[in-house]
Amino acid sequence: MALYGPVRPVEILGRPSVTLSLRTAAPTGQVIARLCDIAPDGSSTLVTRGALNFSVRHGRDRAEPARIGETEGFTFELNGIGHAFAPGHRVRLAVSSTYWPWIWPRPDAAGFTLDPAGSSLTLPVRRRTEDAVVWEEPEQPEPLEVVHPASPEERRPERVVVRDVAKGEWRLEVDPKYGGTRVYPGGLEFTEDALETYTIEESGPLTARTRSDWTIRLRRPDRGWDVGVETRSEITCDAEAFHTSNEVVCREGDEVVFHRTWEKRIPRTAG
């Protein structure tokens, strides 16, 4: 982790890049870099992030293992971003070998040693010109008169972290907030609900698993029809492959008119 303190306001626009001097302990692995804005009170705001699989550090067209025990430069870009660092704020670059659930953990990750002296961060600093750019007001149509009925059920929190001490398990539940009911001017009622779950046990990375549950319902009370789609998708893994399981259920009223499940094995590739 490295800290940099700008002496003046800094505006960036584009894709930051990092060069990290790493000594790896295994021929395969990954590195994740997060660019953060640190306020004077110590609070941190994630600005952007990026990741690199060691095996494809020289290009995605070939897989090449890292040299164990040797220090090597790993260069990669972070996601594009526009951000302004205010006066008194600091720029932080946080580096890690895992970042679950954003990056699936490797079964054989052995970590690495970072040499800060041989590492660098390049920021796409926005250069202001004397000629100010003036934009016209955006053109857009009038919004639809969509009604959002109040739900009698209490809404789930956007994120919940649960730790099961007995099992040594951590679970992250994410509500993407697509849910709720919307009533359109023509009388169509659209209801959507989703929950994403990410679970991992302290015993090791091969226990990582994800699940996504999604429900969509379309109703026209004035026409007497009511249809819905329910989906469930799960991903688990072992040392050689990822395993996916999917299920789709379509209903008309209370009657199931279509039901299908399928599974697929996806081999781990590129180290």
Image (cartoon, rainbow, N blue to C red):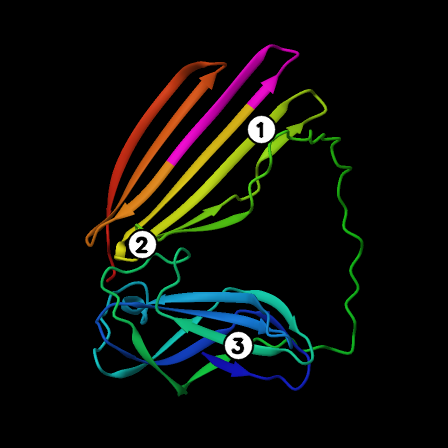
User: Image quadrant for the N terminus?
Assistant: bottom left
Q: Residues within 10 Å of mark 2 (few under 14, many from 20)?
A: few
Q: Residues within 10 Å of mark 3 (few under 14, many from 20)?
A: many
Q: Secondary structure at mark 3?
A: strand
Distance from Cα at disc 3 to Cα at disc 1: 41 Å
Q: Which residues, given as a range, are shown in magenta?
A: 218-232
Residue shown at the point (69%, 26%) measured from the top left? 184
* Pointer 1 residue: 191
Disc tally is 3
**Amino acid type indicated by mark 3:** Arg
Distance from Cα at disc 3 to Cα at disc 2: 31 Å
254 and 51: which is toward the camera:
254
User: Image quadrant for the C terminus?
Assistant: bottom left
* Mark toward the viewer: 1 or 2: 2
Q: Secondary structure at mark 2?
A: loop
Q: Left or right of 253: which side holds 211?
A: left
148 and 53: which is toward the camera:
148
- In the image, residue 218 sits, relative to residue 211, either above or below, namely above
The x, y position of residue 150, in whole percent, is: 68, 31
Q: Residues within 10 Å of mark 1 (few under 14, many from 20)?
A: some
* Pointer 2 residue: 168
The mark nearer the N terminus, 1 or 2, is 2
* Pointer 3 residue: 92
**Amino acid type indicated by mark 2:** Gly
